[in-house]
Amino acid sequence: MTSTQRMSRAEMDQMDSSMFARSLLLMGQTMSTANVIMQLANPAVGYGVAHSTVESGRLDRHPIKRARTTASYLAVAAMGTAEDRRRYRQAVNRQHAQVRSHGDSPVEYNAMNPELQLWVAACLYYGWEDIYERVHGPLTGVERDTFYRQGMVVGTTLQMPAEMWPADREQFQVYWDRQVEDIEIGDEVREFLLDIAHFGYAHPRIQRRHGPTKYRRTIGYLPERFRTALRVSWSATDQQWFDSYVDRQVQRERRKPLWLSQLMFRALLWDVRLRNRFGRPLV
């Protein structure tokens, strides 16, 4: 058994996750919608979100609130203390406990299922690693191992036990490839995801102005297998536009001071602590 597998949830909560905090920040600004699509490509996650009865947490009906709570979760996972993570986990648990399939559901799902939380955490880690390597170059050696261990915290901040995280980056790749083979996006979930990609939940004026770019950017960040499951086209011209877009983002990020990159997420972490202090809902 590896040291990663022996880590308890408490030990994971104490882990310093600063190394991947910056890639989290950039991912939140660039590929967040693509990562949501990757998560929801698992049918149980996709239908669980599309059919969720937790009205206040629905992205398609309360996009600003959902964006805040999701970004707050990421801020807590990457930069919070053990106590921050414990409190946020409890708050999320109360919401997730309400999300479960019924007799007429297309697939069986339960948001408290740690296997589904492992998949969500794996998607987030995949996105963080992708962004980090685009900006800073390939991860190798000890740096790669450290980065990978820190990625576990996005699962343990939810319901995933630490021992479920694949023992090393090589075993993670085996898990990832196996899961990607089984992704499936049905018509109902596909329509839900494409609406998100097109900014369909935003004001029509915002949708007209920013929707096309958001859609192109979102599809560009998706691995090919996910584009195929989503049944979207992607041309050489699209790829050329995307490569240019990513290059501009990378150059801008390399020039940006770390404190500026972290400013929004530190504000969200402060907001979470303030909400807890005054007994206001965290999610």
Image (cartoon, helix red, strand yellow):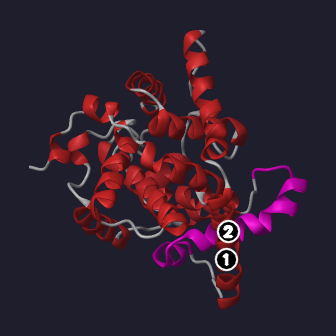
Of residue 216 and residue 102, the one placed in the foreground of this image is 216
Up/down of 105 relative to 62, above or below: below
> Residue lying furthest right in this view?
205
The amino acid beneath tag 2 is Arg
* Residue 257 x %, y %: 64, 49
**Is residue 81 left or right of 74 when viewed as pictured?**
left
Contact between marks 1 and 2 (CB within 8 A): the answer is yes
For label 1, the SS is helix
- In magenta segment, residue 138: no
- In magenta segment, residue 205: yes
* Residue 223 x %, y %: 49, 74
Mark seen at residue 217? 2
Of residue 70 and residue 130, the one placed in the foreground of this image is 130
Q: Which residue carries the number 1 mark?
A: 242
Task: Please give the name of the residue rendered at 49% of the width and 52% of the height, measured from the top-left corner.
Answer: 47
* Residue 206 x %, y %: 86, 54
